[in-house]
Image (tube, rainbow, N blue to C red):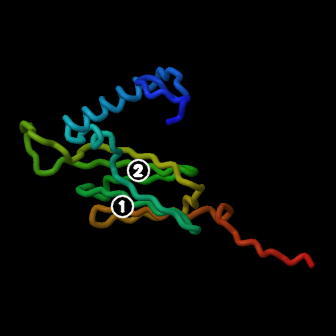
Amino acid sequence: MDPFTLAWPGLGLRGMFDPWRGIEELYREVDRLFRDTLGGFAEWGARAYPALNVWTDEEGATVTALLPGVDASQLEVTVDGDQLRLHGSREASGVEGDPTWHRRERFSGDFRRTLQLPFPVEPDKVTATFSHGVLRIELPRLEADKPRRIQVASGS
């Protein structure tokens, strides 16, 4: 054990009192309490909808969004500079009247999602297709932003 470090609660590096240590421990305990008592619902509720996958290559970016139960006519995709915006609506299905819910985990209603793209794209060349509940958006990178291979000349 390092002779300068004291192993007492509330004391941090080199034996100095750390006032934030108690707050960090409280945060972890409250977080654990919500996870244990609500079965992870607090985490689930905080997730953005729709779930997205985003990947890039030298040619551009591809975004997929899982949107089961959404009609393609209810989707709006816009690109503004280096931002992609998704807007749509998902209707509650199979429910009539005003029932007493015992569990309701499927999202219904309007949704909006904005994604910062890693580079500027060609807005006139963006394509979006929707099939089997999956929205796929192809976002070609601006020609001026594409990486270029530079030939190195010999200086002999």
Q: Which of 37 and 11 is in front in this view?
A: 11
Q: How far apart are marks 2 and 1 (CA)?
A: 10 Å
Q: Which of 134 and 32 is in front in this view?
A: 32
Q: In this view, does 99 lie to the left or right of 134?
A: left
| Image coordinates for residue 75, horizontal then vertical, percent | 35, 54
Q: Is residue 96 above or below residue 4?
A: below
Where residue 156 is drawn, which disc sits there?
A: none
Q: In this view, does 70 lie to the left or right of 137?
A: left
Quarter of the image holding residue 67?
bottom left
Q: Which amino acid does label 2 sit on?
A: Leu
Q: Which of 5 and 118 is in front in this view?
A: 5
Q: Residue placed at 53% from the left, 53% from the top?
A: 117
| Image coordinates for residue 13, horizontal then vertical, percent | 53, 29
Q: Residue placed at 25% from the left, 33% from the top?
A: 34
Question: For the residue carrying disc 2, how many other residues have a C-alpha within 10 Å: few (<14), some (14-19), or many (20+)?
Answer: some
Q: Is residue 75 left or right of residue 58?
A: left
Q: Is residue 56 above or below residue 24?
A: below
Q: Residue placed at 54% from the left, 31% from the top?
A: 3
For disc 1, the marked residue is 135
Element type where label 2 sits in the image: strand
Quarter of the image holding residue 70?
bottom left
For disc 2, the marked residue is 86
Element type where label 1 sits in the image: strand
Find out whether the residues at labels 2 and 1 contact each other: C-beta distance under 8 Å. Answer: yes
Which label's residue is closer to the chain start, 2 or 1? Answer: 2
